[in-house]
Amino acid sequence: MFFKQKKVMLLTLAIMVSMILAACGSEGASGEGTYNWTFVTEEMEGQVQYEYAREFADRLHEKSDGDINIEVFEFGGLGDEVNQVEQLQSGIVEFAIVSPGFTGTMVDEGQLFALQFLFTDDMELNQHILDTSEALNVHLANKYEQHNIKPLAFWTEGAMQWTGNRELRTPEDFNGFKMRTQESPLIVRSYQAYGADPTPMSWGELYTSLDRGVVDGQENPIFFIEDASFHEVQSHMTISRHNIYVAMTTVNPDFYNGLPEDIRNMIDETVEEMRPVGFELQAQLNEELLDSIIDSETHPTEVIELTEAERDAFRALAEPVREYFVNEVVDEDGKMILEMLQSEIEAAQ
């Protein structure tokens, strides 16, 4: 009951914010063509998504000579990750950075990002694939639009790594391991294939859950592990590079399609400008904060880097999950999207 009440309170707050913004008028109460919008993220100030959104907002404000004003919300400001997706769909907020892992129960095809060892180890090449992929930017994007979410860009926040309260070097190390995951059935399936006990939860609960032993470990890019202080309550970090963290810059399509063409063009131009900005931001933070974890004397963490042979043991267990995705999770469209993406990855390599 508490959680239901909490969700109602959060949604009520979001609606109140929306009403306040509406009172200002999306075109300005003064009729001078000003716009006041909301951009929600899944991260906090100083983390990649929030800094991306703030730079995005600043650029649009400058391009429009101050006519476009975007308020950027940190994680939790308007609810959890699932709440924020619902608010985007309903038009309570205009923009959101969304991780496909939190839409896995809504857009089955989006679960392809949960398939481990799908992308390459070259992060620049991966970003190029995300930028140019027809499978993602046309076909998968259309699937999201059917649910009132318009992806403007797919981009990476870096390679995913594991942390745990014990060494994670072989699939046997995952036996009975309580692994926190996002709300994606395919992520759950991936860790079940390793013998783990996956537990979906919001990251807002994760630090405490790791500290108290509710879960034994988690996966995230390095910058997030350090900035969210997960390394303080985890004794080991494994450089596994088993996946890449993909985020989507999204907009409510009804809102977007209702804008004047020049404003839409301004948004599109800014999305393109942000592609290299977002990539450089994550690259810098992942590199710098890895050093912070390694050098920490207050919270020493054993950092393990898997060999290719060790990664191959996990890769072999990930293959049947890909077959499960094609045969059990998606229809022919989803199969086509995955096969096209795989062809694009192979061509890029």
Image (cartoon, rainbow, N blue to C red):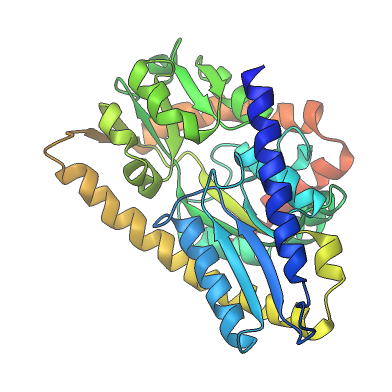
Residue 87 in the figure: left or right of residue 116: right
Quadrant of the rendering where the N terminus is positioned: top right
Q: Residue at x 35, y 58 (%)?
A: 285
**Between 267 and 273, the one nearer to me in the picture:** 267
Residue 14 picture location, percent across and down: 68, 47
Q: Position of residue 222 (x, y in %)?
A: 36, 46
Judge by depth and name the residue closer to the eye, 207 or 288.
207
Residue 93 seen in this snapshot: no
Q: Split into 4 quadrants, where in the image is the C terminus? A: bottom right
Q: Which residue is drawn at 40% across and 45% down?
A: 224
The quadrant where residue 261 appears: bottom right
* Tag count: 0
User: Measured from the top left, where is residue 21 in percent x and y?
Assistant: 71, 63
Q: Splitting the image into 4 quarters, where does residue 22 fall?
A: bottom right
**Which residue is the extreme one toward the top?**
176
User: On the picture, is 146 further left or further right than 201?
Assistant: right
Residue 140 higher or lower than 234, as above or below: below
Residue 144 sits above or below residue 137 on the image: above
Q: Tell me: 17 left or right of 235.
A: right
What residue is at 61 percent from the left and 61 percent from the top?
A: 129
**77 or 32: nearer the eye?**
32
Q: Is residue 59 above or below residue 292?
A: below
- Residue 245 on image: x %, y %: 52, 47
Which quadrant of the view contains residue 260? bottom right
Does any portion of residue 129 appear in the rendered image? Answer: yes
